Amino acid sequence: MDSDPKLLPRDKLLRDTFTPAETLLFALILLVANVAFWLADPRSYWLLGFFLIAAAVSVVVLKTHQHTHPFFVTFLWRKFWLCTAPVWLLLLQFVVGIWQQPLATLQLDRVDFVQFTIPPGYWLPVSTSPESAWVVVLGFGAMPIVAVGLFIVPKSRAFFEQLMPWLCLSAVLVSLIGYLQKGLDVTKPMLTKGTGASDFFAFFPYDGHWAAFAILWTCACLSMALLTTRYEDSPPFFESSGPWYLTGGTLLAGTAFLVEARWPATLLILTYAAMMALLSWHFFQASKDPHRKTIACLSGLVSVGMTAAGLFRIFQTTSHPTADEHLRQAVWAMFRDRPIFGWGMDSFGHLFPFYSSDLLLGENYERAGSDALQLLAEFGILGLIPSILLLAILLGRYFMARRDIQLTHHLLLGLAATLILGFLDSPFMSPAVFFSFVVLTFIALRWADVTRYRADEVDAPRPTLVTPHNLRRVPFHAKPTGEKYK
C-alpha cells in the first residue's frame, strides 16, 4: 500500500532507494542482530565488546546520513543525544560510583574475608564491582546507541519492509535450532558454557530468556503477516508471503511448550493467542480475501485453544516458590537501604549473601527473579527515571498524534508483554532480548512517522504559519490609535 500514490515514479524511486547511510545501517543492524541472536550468552565479554564496536560504527552511519540524505534533515544530533541520554547518565552514575565501594577485603589469620559497609554518601552513587561491571555497563549501553539509527535514518517504509523479513528469519532459524536440540536431547546450550541446569533453549542458557525473545519476534512475524493483507495490490493471503510469516510466528510461539519457566512460557502463549485473535478479527471484519472465512475461523480456534493453554499454565505449580519469594525480599531490602542511586550494576550477586534469608545460606544467585526490582536496587529511583521518562515521551508523542498505525500497535503489544515479564522474571539480562526490545521499539515508532508523512517531510522543519510579533517587519497597531514599526 503506497503511502503517497500521487508521487511520480521518479520520486518513488528516490524515496525507496537506499541512501549510503541506509545501506550502512541495514548491514549494521543485520550483523549485530545475528551476532546477538546466535551468541546469546548474557555475560560474554566478546559479545559485549562487539556491541561497543558497533556503537562506534553507528556514529559513522549518522554522520553519513547527515551528508548524503536527499531531503531536509533537522535536529539529527539533537534526536540522537535525547534518545541516548539515559545511557550517558547511567555511565556517569557508574563512573561517579567507582569512588564509593561498599565491599572491601579483610584479612584475618591469613584468611581473606569480604567486609560489607554501607557508604556514608547517601546521595552519591556506589559501585559494588567496577572491575567486572564496566564491560556489562558499556556493552548494554551500546545497544540503544546502535538501535537509535532506526529512529533517525530510514526515510520510508521500504527500509523496514526489506529489513524485517531478514530479522524475522534469523529469529525463526534460532527456534529451529532449539527444536533440533530438544529432539537430539543435547545436554547444554550451543556456543556457551551454560549454567549447568537443564532449563536452556538453543543458544540461550535460560529458557525464560528465550521465551521473552520469542514473544518479541512472534509479534513481529504476525505483524508482518497482517501487513501483507493491507496492501492495495496484495494477492490472496495464501498466495502472498503472509503464510510464511504466520508459520514463523507459530514456530516461535510453539516453543512455549518446551520452556520450563512458568511465567515466560505463559506470556508467550497468551501473546500468540492475542495476535491470532487480531488476525481472526481482521479477516472476519475487514478483509476481502476469498478465503477470509476459513482463515478467520481457523485463527479464532487457535486463539481460543492457546488461551486455554495459557490459563492452564498460569495455575501450574512451580518447583521453587520459596526461593523466589526470598530473592524478592532480599532485593527489596537492598533497595530500601539505598533507594536514590542503588548499589551499582551487577551488585545483587555480590551483596546477596549479606541480605539473603537463612534458608538460602550457601547458595549464590545472580538475578533476583524480577528485573524491575533488581534494576531499582542496582540503579535506584534517580537512575531509572531518565529511561522511563524517555520511553514515556516517545510513546506519548505517538499516541498524542492520534495515529492509528496497525503494525506499530502490534509491535507495541509484544513490547508491553516483555515489560510485564520484567516484573515476573529477568528477560532483560539477555543481550538478545534487550537488543530486540530497543530495535523493535524504534522500528515501531519510526514506522508510524514514515507512514503518515511524505518522505521529504518526515525530518523537515514544520512550516511556521503564524510569525511572532517581535519578528514581524510590517506595521501593527500597538494601541487603539497610532501605529508602530518593528
Image: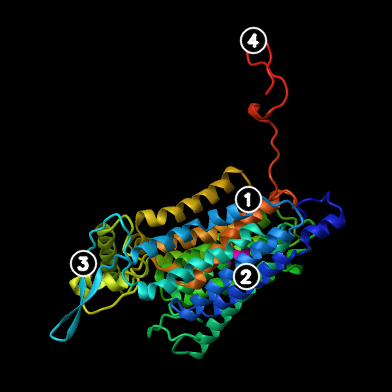
Q: Position of residue 230 (x, y in %)?
A: 72, 57
Instruction: Give the numbered dot on residue 29.
Output: 2
> Dot 4: few (<14), some (14–19), or many (≥20) neighbours within 10 Å?
few
Are circles 2 and 3 on residues that touch, CB within 8 Å? Answer: no
> Dot 1: few (<14), some (14–19), or many (≥20) neighbours within 10 Å?
few
Q: Nearer the viewer, mark 2 or mark 3?
A: 3
- The CA span between labels 1 and 2 is 23 Å
Q: Dot 4 corresponds to which residue?
A: 480
Amino acid found under the numbered disc labelled 4: Pro
Instruction: Give the numbered dot on residue 117.
Output: 3
Q: Nearer the viewer, mark 1 or mark 2?
A: 1
User: Is residue 323 visible in the rendered structure shown here?
Assistant: yes
Q: Position of residue 311 (x, y in %)?
A: 43, 64
| Label 2 residue SS | helix
243 in magenta = no
Among numbered discs 2 and 3, the one appearing first in the sequence: 2
Q: Nearer the viewer, mark 4 or mark 3?
A: 4
Among numbered discs 4 and 3, the one appearing first in the sequence: 3
State the quadrant of the C terminus.
Answer: top right
Are circles 1 and 2 on residues that touch, CB within 8 Å? Answer: no
Instruction: Give the residues in magenta.
Output: 218-222
Among numbered discs 4 and 1, the one appearing first in the sequence: 1
Q: Dot 1 corresponds to which residue?
A: 75
